[in-house]
Amino acid sequence: MLRKEGVSALTQTRVAAAAGLRQSHLTYYFPRKTDLLAATLEASHAQAHKPKRGSMGSDVDPVEAVRALMFERNRMRFFLSVVAQASDQSDIRATLAAHARGVAEQLAPLFGRTADDPDIIAFVDMLRGMGLRLLLESDDKRRAAVDIDALAARFGLRRSPEARL
């Protein structure tokens, strides 16, 4: 619902109906919209870092995983809608910060770096910025053509041959 329609679609009435719950039950656990949004974001974050059923972690190309995370329209729209809500909500900001750290933690070993390396952090930030720019463009072929390894090289990052995510 959030990915397709944005934060404005996240109402207790709609979520309760979609989940097959009474609204009073949902309100008991999530009294504010921000509580519901924070829980949704945490669940999305956990799902994004969970291995897909039927796949082996080592079979997933990390470059394609990053491409899907940063350049897929619905995911970027969802991310931006949450960021817009997060400016004054500490619980949502904390979940977004954990997500940002998680992306850096997944990418850093690929380049033989640590997640707190400034080049890794700048690389992740640049990918998010490109995701935003590509969201505004209508050419889906450009999204597929982004050379993530070449972008990493701009930050002095080169994949370690033995590194695996």
Image (tube, rainbow, N blue to C red):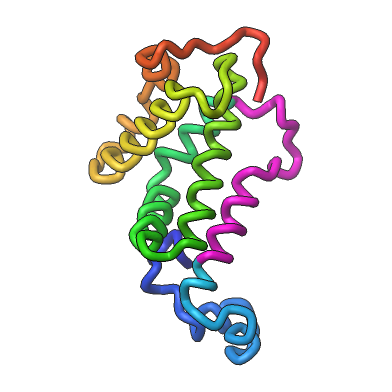
Q: Look at 55% across and 16% down and name the residue there.
A: 111
The answer to which of 75 and 120 lies nearer the viewer is: 120
Residue 42 vertical position relative to residue 24 in the rendered view, above or below: above
Task: Name the residue at 64% across, 43% down.
Answer: 49
Q: Name the residue furthest top.
A: 161
Q: How many numbered marks are there?
A: 0
Q: Confirm whether the magenta stretch covers residue 145.
A: no
73 or 70: nearer the viewer: 70
Q: Is residue 101 left or right of 70 when viewed as pictured? A: right
Residue 154 sits in quarter: top left
- In magenta segment, residue 59: yes
| 158 to 142, vertically: above or below | above
Name the residue at the left extreme. 137
Instruction: Return the x and y of residue 21 as percentages of the image width and height.
Output: 64, 85
**Residue 52 at x, y percent in the picture:** 69, 43
Q: Which of 136 and 7 is in front in this view?
A: 7
Position of 83 relative to 150 (above/below): below
The residue under the point 74% across, 44% down is 53
State the quadrant of the C terminus. top right
How far across and how far down the image is residue 61, in percent?
59, 25
**Image location (x, y in percent) of residue 79:** 42, 52
Range of magenta residues: 38-61
Position of residue 86 relative to residue 118, above or below, is below
Residue at position x 50%, y 47% from top? Answer: 97
- Taking the image as shown, residue 101 lies to the left or right of residue 73, namely right
Residue 75 is left or right of residue 39, and the answer is: left
Nearer to the camera, 115 or 71:
115
